Amino acid sequence: MRWIRIFVSGLLLLALPVLAHKASDSYLTLQVQGDRVLGQWDIALRDIDFALGLDPDGNGDINWGELRARHADIAAWALSALTLERGGTCPLQVTQHQIDDHTDGTYAVLQLAGQCPTPEGALGVHYRLLFDQDALHRGLLRLELDGLTRSAVFAPDTTRQSFAAGEVSHLTQFGQFFIQGIWHIWIGFDHILFLLSLLLPVVLIRQAGHWHAVGRFRDALHEVLWVVTSFTAAHSITLSLAALGYVSLPSRLVESAIAVSVVLAALNNLTPLISQRRWMVAFGFGLIHGFGFASVLAELGLPQQTLVLSLVGFNLGVETGQLAVVAAFLPLIYGLRHTQFYRQVIFKGGSLLTMAIALVWLTERVFDLKLISS
Amino acid sequence: MPNHWLTGLFPIRVSTSLAALLLIMSVGVPASPRTPTNDAQVLETLPTRAGDTAARELARLRAAVAQTPNDPQRVEELAQRYLDLAMARGDPRYVGYAEAVLNGFTTALPAPLLTLRGVLRQYRHDFSGALQDFAAALALAPDHAIAHAWRGAVFLVQADYAAASIECEALRRMNREALAGGCLGLTQAYGGQLEAGYQTLQHTLERVSNADNRLWLLTRLGEVAAWRGQPAQAKAHYLEALKLGRDDVYLLAAWSDFLLDNGQPAEVARLLATWESADSLLLRLTEAQSALQLPDAPRHRQMLADRFAAARARGDTTHRAEEARFELRLRHDPRTALRLAQENYALQREPRDARILLEAAIAAKDSAGAQSVRDWLSRSGFEDARTRQWAQTSTQVGLTGEKR
């Protein structure tokens, strides 16, 4: 040892900037959704060699064959240094061995999968790889827990860390479901077609057996507000009841009923059965549409800790999406209301087409077939 | 849920897919693990071959320590070997190995092991912990010269020159000439006596024949000569050090700083062209390339940013001085540079650390931010004219929002 070097200042001898390499890190990414665990663990080959020895022929190189021969040992060694707990220990397995290149060399990549005893509650991670042999080793964790991403560093003095599932920003949770609400009304073509069918006639007035253009925008708007509001109120009620578990209807029945509602709404434009109080139609069928949304929400999964907030967010998203459609639609049809084009092509032709599509949906849903849906 | 026609085109769970993508992108791991197909494909070359003598010796020591982790002699030998390798190779993994070996020693540490632990702590910039260890070592073995030397070095970093000179005196009394000379020379140079410091180092150089020690002394002589305003003399010292023909990161860094200060970036770009792997040299290389607007500059800037980010990710805060310089000179972000320089100066107060703080404060037009350096200058009397000039300038910025 060259003792004089002790007085190297600043870059005091062993301070990192002087050194060419980097200390040891492993990269662990985990996705924990409910009780399912998926992950990927990148560990430097150099570190594995230091701990286990990977170079039996001693030539200084590690090749794929030598690595493959130790895969079982590597898996056992790695898994013995990592413990996940969610309501109890989550047994993990290595499902695949690969490699990847990082800035400081080649790493072994272990694909992980596992199952936890419970789908809820805090996740405990106990990481202790290499610490008894390399005190500068760090485990860099990227964890996605129930949809939220966070990161952590494991060091010899922080081997256990706990991640609470419910520490989600309420605003974020609300926002996420709000977006989902908008999205699902926009891709919910049956809901959209129902709404549009109810709205097509608002710029017209039935008088003496014929349709006439409505005089003032205010009247059309008035009608729109009644229809949309009753539809909204109705589906909010049943969505909430179903999402919170108070009412439950078989989904095939619900979907078929929704298709029927679209048929009838379109039919009503062609042979007006109900020209007054369309809002009652909107309300009545809105109740059924609400159950349709509830099944979407069930698939997304309402988080326990922010149940009501997420439900409200989803509802508001649906309303907002609806309003966007209406706001785009209404001025258009109001502008066209005098034209024959509107009365014949859009109003009559559109309603016919809608009815046809809805009839196909009805057939699909009742008989569990796939005719036009993917 | 019914399947709508166009559902197949849209991901139902937009947010989940986005989150997965962000996760992958944010990890910094290239999302491209692969499975090789050829058993003979070489994946990694190890730093030591299992067969060579050094590696065999190391393996023997490791096995010995594994058998008896509380044997002080074996532990000391192995930890020392690791530290030597760390310095020779510039590889911090060996520092981690040394620390782990010391951690495995469960009974009370004897003086040599305490000193080693102190060295490891100062590496992490745990200076108070290091000083405790050195003090404990000296309590057990007052003649342990190495502990005195390391303690003196830490005091110099902390700008406590009175305490440092006590250590230098202890080394002199123990007749450790080279160590004492190095200690005293720096204490004088930092403490407002550049001339005396220069003479001390020069005298020590005349008595030292070991090449590594000469290299170190010549490098410090170059720095002190530059502070004294004697560039020709400084250059002579640096060139003599380079002529010793050893790759030394510290020498190259000091020489590059001298060249950059004297407006010779081309020389730096040429000198450091192959030193990308050493962070401190990459920094100076990139500064030179940026000054010359060479095509590699943007790539190197990105490399530096990535390295600092990786260090931050693992919680490593030991190179804020370098990062401050990066932010100031390459990213042109004086506010961030000033913050980092201040954080650095809280722990490390050598002239280099003072300089980056002054430069950042001037650029950020924050006069108050450099107060700690001005205090040090008045206490120590450090004589480098350029540093004193910067300190003067730093009092004039930020008062009316512009330099007067």
Image (cartoon, grey):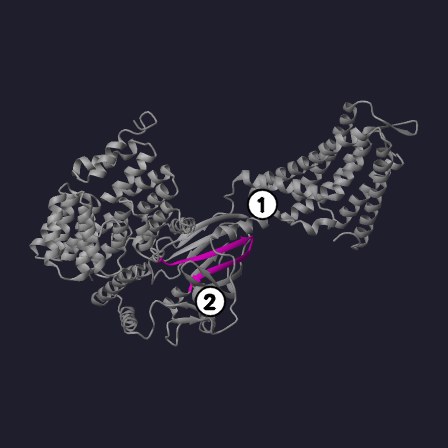
- N-term-proximal mark, 1 vs 2: 2
Vertical placement of residue A89 versus A310, above or below:
below
Chain assignment, label 1 = A
Quarter of the figure that contains the C terminus of chain B: top left
Q: At 32% across and 38% down in the image, what residue appears? A: B360
The chain that hosts pointer 2 is A
Q: Which mark is residue A303?
A: 1
As measured in the structure, the alpha-carbon distance from the residue carrying label 1 to the one carrying label 2 is 34 Å
Q: Are marks 1 and 2 in contact (CB under 8 Å)?
A: no
Q: Quadrant of residue B243?
A: bottom left
Q: Identify the disc placed on residue A75.
A: 2
Residue A267 placement: quadrant: top right
- Residue A82 position, x and y percent, is 44, 60
Q: Of helix, strand and loop, which one carries label 1?
A: loop
Front position in the image: A121 or B102 = B102
Task: Name the spot of residue A255 as percent of width and height, x first.
Answer: 76, 47
The magenta span reads: A21-44
Side of B25 where A214 appears, left or right: right
Membership of A26 in magenta stretch? yes
* Residue B53 point in image, percent of width and height: 28, 74
Bin the neighbour count of mark 1 within 10 Å (Cα to Cα): few under 14, some 14-19, many 20 and up: some
Left or right: A165 in relation to A320? left
- Give the amino acid at mark 2: Ala
Nearer to us of marks 1 and 2 is 2
Return the residue nearer the eye: A298 or B229.
B229
